[in-house]
Amino acid sequence: MELKDIDLSDSRNFVDGVPHHWFAYLRRECPVQWHLDPNGQAEGFWSVTRHEDCVNVNRDYEHFSSARAATLFTDMDPENLASLQLMMLNMDPPMHTRYRRLVSKGFTPRMIRDLGEKVVTATDQIIDGVCETGSADFVEQISAELPLQVIADLMGVPQSDRHLVFDWSNHMIGSEDPEFQVSPESSTQASMELYAYADQLCEKKRLDPHEDLFSVLTQAEIEGDSLSQLELDLFFLLLAVAGNETTRNLISGAMAAFFDNPDQWDRLLADRSLLPSAIEEMLRFVTPVMHFRRQATMDWAIGDQKISEGDKVVFWHTSANRDESVFGETADKFDIGRTPNNHIAFGGGGPHFCLGANLARMEIKVMFERLLDRVPDIRQSGEVQHLQSNFINGVKHLPVAFTPSAPVTP
């Protein structure tokens, strides 16, 4: 293998799964690599693959900005960039600090705790929907449903509308996948429809507020500062994707990992006390968000590599979470008892640490508790199909089979 053989910019190279052998080579031979970007407006980008460097770039907002060119791999035109810079993900402090203070008023630990009972009930109802047949598409019928129902409840979206959010997020995140990309404009169309829906939802919440997140956010104010409608729309989009796509793909990817490592499923069946460490290992091993992008604000360095002001920098969580210098010789092994486990699936700390980390962990915990209880003999019954994306480590379809059983909810 040579560096010229590696192309991380082409999403087609991720259809068969994450090319972990490429990342291992880069960590060893060229951990901060200048990578040509043939499809972008930029000449190329720095590809950062070691754990320590990824953590440093993520935390160092003074030298590596989320706001200058946003955090997505694709280079944006000025008009679209200006809109995206109003999304929390694409801000630097102090703007990010101001925005996070406002949205945190509706994202409290109490609100997350109050969702706990609903998560258990929803999970049982989801499994009830397939338990009598003894088979399912794990993604479409099980893993996709739980985060979709939870995020709908959190945001105040009627459950009858939740599949609209599912379809919009699929078309935005799966914009390069032939299954979801029905036309070159479908990703843009999906985002516009989502914004229009958010506008209508917020107006309803202003007139008739409840206990949900967007009822709180439409009223949220700190020292006279409040969120504009565009900021609310963009936060709705962020939650629709981050609260839906990531958890769905984590649960799906983790189930596939258990199928590839059945000894670990048996181990968890025999010892439920391993579930907390198993959840962290699922997050590390799957890493649903594979990278984020930053822009250098001045001449600086990553390790020994000099970086120039304005350079595009892409740091790969999916590589950092397999770094042998942190996770040892078993970095590529799925080990549910791994400890310590310093993964960066939620960002590795700093101002951009995932706001929904505790909610995601709760959903993962409940889902696997109920799967272990109710379908302990679950097994793969067909080919796993991966999303065509170099951003989200996604599973589109995962056929499963299990012993039929009776529903448990009325």
Image: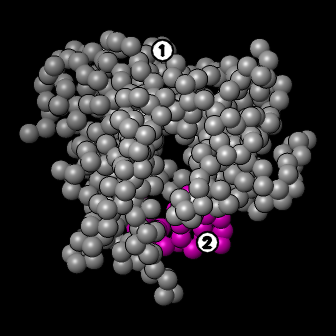
Mark 2: amino acid: Met
Q: Nearer the viewer, residue 292 or 366?
A: 292
Residue 364 visible (yes or no): no
Marks 2/1: CA–CA distance: 44 Å
The residue beneath circle 2 is 95
Q: Which element type, helix, strand or loop, lies under badge 2?
A: helix
In magenta segment, residue 87: yes
Q: Which residues are magenta?
A: 85-111
Residue neighbourhood size for the residue with mark 1, other residues' Cα within 10 Å, grouped as few (<14), some (14–19), many (≥20): few
The residue beneath circle 1 is 260
Q: Nearer the viewer, residue 322 or 42?
A: 42
Looking at the image, which residue is at 26% across and 67% down? 200
Q: Position of residue 390 (x, y in %)?
A: 57, 33
Q: Nearer the viewer, residue 39 or 344?
A: 39
Residue neighbourhood size for the residue with mark 2, other residues' Cα within 10 Å, grouped as few (<14), some (14–19), many (≥20): few
Q: Position of residue 99 (x, y in %)?
A: 53, 70
Mark 1: amino acid: Asp
Q: Nearer the viewer, residue 302 or 192?
A: 192
Q: Position of residue 364 (x, y in %)?
A: 41, 38
Residue 198 visible (yes or no): yes
Looking at the image, which residue is at 55% across and 62% down? 79
Looking at the image, which residue is at 60% across and 67% down? 96
Q: Position of residue 60 (x, y in %)?
A: 75, 57
